[in-house]
Image (cartoon, helix red, strand yellow):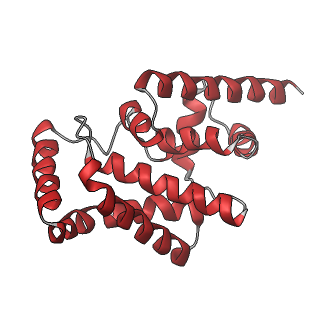
C-alpha cells in the first residue's frame, strides 16, 4: 500500500531542527503550525463532518502540542504522527463529552482497498456489505481502519498515533480485517 505520508530521513531530520528551534523559542512553533494545520484539519474534519467543530478541535490540539513540545521525544517518525495522536485524542474527547454519533468520511477507493485486503472480490454487493459492516465496528476498531486504509498510513505511524507498538498495530488491523472477512463471507452465503 502506498504511503503518501512517507518522509525521507533528511526531511525528518530537517523537521526535527524546526522542532528544536520551536522548543527554544515558542514563536517558532508558528512554522510547525503552518506546515501541519491543513493536514490536521482534514484529519479531524473527516472524523467530525463539521468545519466549525473541526476548527475548534484543531485549535485545541495545536495548543496542547505547543504546551507539550518540551516533552516531545523524537523517535525517527514524522512529527506529524505526534500531532495526529494529539488531534485524535481531542476528537475522542469531543465524542465522549458530547455523546454524538461518530462521522466517517470515505471514498470508493478506500472501500476497494479494504475489500482487496480482506481477499474478497470487488463488487457493488461487497461495497454495500463492507459499508454496513464498517458501521458495526467499535470506535477503536474504526480508528485502525481509518488510519490504515482511508489515510494510507504506515503501520509505524498508526502505532505512534494510537500509542501502541508497530507489531500491535499490524496484529490488530489484520484481526479487524479477518473479522470483516468472516462477516462478509457469512453475509454472502445468506
Quadrant (top left/top right/bottom left/bottom right) for the N terminus: top left
> Which corner quadrant of the image does residue 134 belong to?
top right
Q: Nearer the viewer, residue 190 or 174?
A: 174
Relative placement, left or right, of 175 versus 41 is right
> Which corner quadrant of the image does residue 4 belong to?
top left
**Quick check: can you spot residue 89?**
yes
Q: Nearer the viewer, residue 14 or 164?
A: 164
**Quick check: can you spot residue 120?**
no
Relative placement, left or right, of 108 versus 164 is right
Q: Nearer the viewer, residue 181 or 77?
A: 77
Relative placement, left or right, of 72 versus 90 is left
Note whether 16 is above or below 119 in the view shown.
Answer: below
> In x, y percent, where is residue 12?
17, 43
Note whether 124 is above or below 46 in the view shown.
Answer: above
At x 57% / y 26%, what residue is drawn?
172
Quadrant (top left/top right/bottom left/bottom right) for the C terminus: top right
> In x, y percent, where is residue 87?
45, 57
> In x, y percent, where is residue 33?
27, 66
At x 49% / y 53%, what residue is drawn?
88
Relative placement, left or right, of 85 versus 136 is left
At x 26% / y 44%, what residue is drawn?
78
Amino acid at each position: 500500500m502506498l504511503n503518501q505520508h512517507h518522509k525521507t530521513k533528511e526531511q525528518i531530520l530537517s523537521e526535527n531542527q524546526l522542532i528544536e528551534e520551536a522548543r527554544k523559542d515558542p514563536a517558532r512553533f508558528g512554522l510547525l503550525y503552518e506546515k501541519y494545520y491543513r493536514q490536521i484539519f482534514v484529519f479531524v474534519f473527516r472524523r467530525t463532518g463539521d468545519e466549525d467543530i473541526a476548527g475548534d478541535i484543531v485549535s485545541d490540539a495545536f495548543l496542547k502540542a505547543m504546551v507539550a513540545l518540551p516533552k516531545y521525544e523524537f523517535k525517527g517518525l514524522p512529527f506529524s504522527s505526534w500531532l495526529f495522536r494529539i488531534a485524535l485524542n481531542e476528537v475522542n474527547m469531543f465524542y465522549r463529552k458530547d455523546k454524538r454519533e461518530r462521522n466517517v468520511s470515505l471514498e470508493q477507493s478506500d472501500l476497494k482497498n479494504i475489500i482487496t485486503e480482506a481477499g474478497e472480490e470487488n463488487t457493488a454487493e461487497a461495497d454495500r456489505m463492507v459499508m454496513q459492516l464498517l458501521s458495526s465496528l467499535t470506535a477503536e476498531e474504526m480508528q485502525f481502519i481509518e488510519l490504515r486504509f482511508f489515510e494510507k498510513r504506515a503501520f509505524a505511524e498508526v502505532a505512534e498515533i494510537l500509542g501502541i507498538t508497530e507489531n500491535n498495530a499490524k496484529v490488530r488491523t489484520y484481526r479487524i480485517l479477518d473479522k470483516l472477512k468472516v462477516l462478509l463471507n457469512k453475509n454472502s452465503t445468506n
